[in-house]
Amino acid sequence: MSDGSPSKSKRELRAERRRGPAPALGRLEFLRWMWAQLTSMRTALLLLLLLAVASLPGSFVPQRGVDARAVEAFRGRHPDLSPWLDRLGVFSVYSSPWFSAIYLLLMVSLVGCIIPRSRIYLRALRARPPKAPRRFERLPASGTFETSADVDTVLAAARRVVRRSRVDVVTEDGEGGSRGELRAERGYLRELGNLVFHISVVVVLVGVAVGSLIGYRGAVIVTEGNRFSNVLTQYDEFTSGTWFDPDSLPPFSLELDDLVAEFDIGDGPQRGAPRLFEANGTFRDGLDGDEEDYSIRVNHPLSIGSTDIFLVGQGYSPVIRVTDPEGNVVFDEAVPFLPEDATYTSGGVVKVPDIQPEQLGMQGFFLPTAASTGEGEASISIFPAAANPYIALQAWTGDLGLDEGTPQSVYVLDTTDMTQVLNENGDPFRIELQPGQSSTLPDGTVVEFTRLQQFARFQISSSPLAGLPLGGVAVGLGGLVLSLFVRPRRTWVRATSDGSRTVVEVAALDRVPRDDLPDDLTAFIDRLRDEIEPQETP
Amino acid sequence: MTLAEYAEFSNYAVASGTLVLALAFLAHLAELLFVRQEAVVPATASVGGASQGSVAVADEDDDEVEPRSAVLSRVGIALTIVATGLLVAGVVTRALASTRVPWGNMYEFGLTGVSIALVVYLVLVRITAIQWIGPLVTGFGLAILGLAWSAYVPAGPLVPALHSYWLVIHVAAVMIAGALFLVGASASLLYLLKERAENKGHVGPILSRVPTIATMDRLAYRTHAVGFVLWTFGALIAGPIWAHYAWGRYWGWDPKEVWAFITWVVYAGYLHARATAGWKGRGAAIIALAGFATFLFSYYGVNIFVPGLHSYAK
Ligand code: HEM
């Protein structure tokens, strides 16, 4: 549609109007003018490039929706800049008002462009190929030859040669002989493809937006031997669309029996690279369905109804038992430590609220394969599998702050109302344990690392309309191929007979100019001559 | 051969392929130098006498002794063919050594990508004689091979997140798209240079060997059109499907995804610009170059500068 399209002349009119002195516009005219501006291709182009620019900051500044912890870390590192970035919405670019504004304007522009073009296209579908221009030499490719065949034979042959085109044949008998004209047009699929493509862009944009409004996504850490039930309170992280009702979470539950993690044990630089992660256990669909076995691997989620459960991470949960000085066990749980690097050096927090008289909190790290780096130096982890598990903690006593009603992360220890437990030299008391070992705090509390378990981090999500954008892009791709590679072409054949000889003139015009048109036309004329006089071919 | 022998063979093949490509690049550079010199000689000769006769004599000379630049051009192409053969052999043996597709980390991605780009370029040389972009393509290829070497890892199996046939499809489509974008960007760059020279009224000897700006515009358009289709498929269909299985969401504005999207938008902008009065030609060519810059950043920059989920980044 780049040449000779009605929209182009409209565009020119618009441009002319813009160039003149601005007339005083009525409100309706102004709106119409705005609409024309918005739906012009130039505006679409600018909006498109603007959208690219607008999505830039989100790739450099961490995003809340992607990694909330990274956002907090970033804020810690840039205390002066962050309030400004926050005000501008840079921590959640893709849901910020300005991003949405560009997105919406682009949608409107697209729709405003599609509707009139579809109307034009529908009209063009019914239209007949246009009349031949008077002078063929003016067209980008033309040729002529003479033959003894009559006009009807020539035109019938031409009709066979143009093959799959829309064709009209007009003939008239004059005084000195007869004349006839064949008009052929092909390539209507190009514009159709273009429309399909642009419509599917709208479908994808709408599909993604609606999908995120009615979907949900959450993450949960489950230690071996534990069960997860799909209710809001069990999630560690949960986000859902505005239209999603968290009470309508589908009821299912799953138990993790065994987590398999294998790492490269070769000596090369790939040593320690992950090779296999697999979570095995049983699940139950609904409240009283049957127990069924599952096995989830990376790239192989478990689907329960419309919900998918993905294995997105794994790590270690040392089982910690705390016994108070009177000998009562006040804590005995597997505590997930979150991996911080490729060797699974993991950080974690143990909160013991049920100990008297003061609550106890411990914070430290876990190393799956500890190795000492020298006298007095901290140990490091040298391999991600648990060959030499080791845990190092420091302890605080006081008020954990759990009762104040403000939600608190289980992975953060708030020590504002606590005092650190010190040893007899006044240095922080260090608890260093391997499985089976225990350590006694100065007040007689015993902390024991009984055994090591593993945890799986599952992402649980429902993307109910995922098929819509996916189907949209797939159909759009088909449209794109048509719109880029179909060549619309008009061909005219005019035959003029003086009774004995017939002069045949041929011309072609591409709606999208191409350089091989003259060659194509020569080939066309050869085929036409063969078709008219087959016996003459050698 | 054993897996280790395949791996070793692959390294030798890639190393020698890189060297030969460097020679091809040098040959093309030398070719450009000779083009300049040769341009000076006939110019001075024609000052003396511009009669028909003297021109004819000069022509006869040309028939006997092929200009050095033409020889060097053919040497450059021949070396490029050898380099491509070596690199392809390196890619194939790398795949045999690790018993999987050869695009599981940055090294392999760069290596396979350059091999595909060179094959596409050589096929186009065959079809439409575009050896005039030789210096650009071999230069870029060398740069990307250098980046790949800097991320070298020995052949080995994949990390679990990459165990997916969608990865195969996704990366293959994206790499071929990248190869086409490279050819398209080279044509657009030369287009801009030559157009500027024409506007100034002085087209130097090197640029006058390059075909007309209309030809380059057309080449750029075709390679970008095919590349855009493949990019749409690879980055916007296969990528999200893989992401769905690997991470539980098909699109999450991960930095790599953001940049794939930006690249797509900029190239869509290019296709639009070519169909918009006032943006045709120059404007479109500039957008095409911007598109290639965003492509390079989404391929390499993101992995270096921005942490993200794409786990072969490290
Ligand atoms: C995400 C947004 C968009 C994308 C990815 C996109 C993509 C494309 C592509 C690939 C073409 C084919 C170019 C060609 O035929 O050479 C095209 C053509 C076109 N687009 Fe868009 N487009 C978008 C938005 C829009 C919008 C908002 C408008 C309308 C205001 C628009 C109007 C047009 C027009 C008029 C053409 C025809 C150009 C021609 O036939 O040569 N596009 N678009």
Image: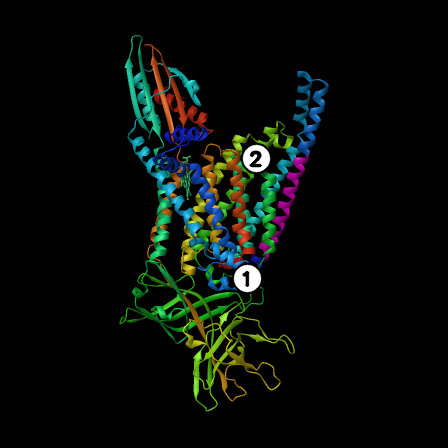
Residues tagged by mark 1 and mark 2 found on one chain of the structure: no
Q: Nearer the viewer, residue A349 or B91?
A: A349
Q: Which residue is mark 1?
A: A79
Tell whether position B17 is magenta: yes
Report, in whole angstroms, how far the alpha carbon at label 1 lies from the one at label 2. Answer: 45 Å
In percent of the image, x 38 and y 24: which residue is there?
A527
Quarter holding the N terminus of chain B?
Answer: bottom right
Q: Nearer the viewer, mark 1 or mark 2?
A: 1
Span colored in magenta:
B8-33
State the residue position of label 2.
B192
Residue type of the residue flagged with mark 1: Pro
Residue B218 drawn above or below residue B52: below
- Label 1 marks a residue whose chain is A
- Residue at the (57%, 45%) spot, across then down: B84
Q: Tag on residue A286? A: none
Q: What residue is shown at x 45% (from left), y 56% (from top)?
A: A92
Residue A426: percent from left, percent from top: 61, 83
Secondary element type, mark 2:
helix
Count numbered badges in the picture. 2
Residue B76, above or below A147 = below
Which chain does the numbered disc 2 sit on? B
The image shows residue A132 at horizontal and vertical percentages of: 35, 20
- State whether residue A8 appears in this view: yes
Left or right placement of residue A289 versus residue B135 in this view: left
Type of secondary structure dominating the magenta stretch: helix
Q: What amino acid does circle 2 point to?
A: Leu
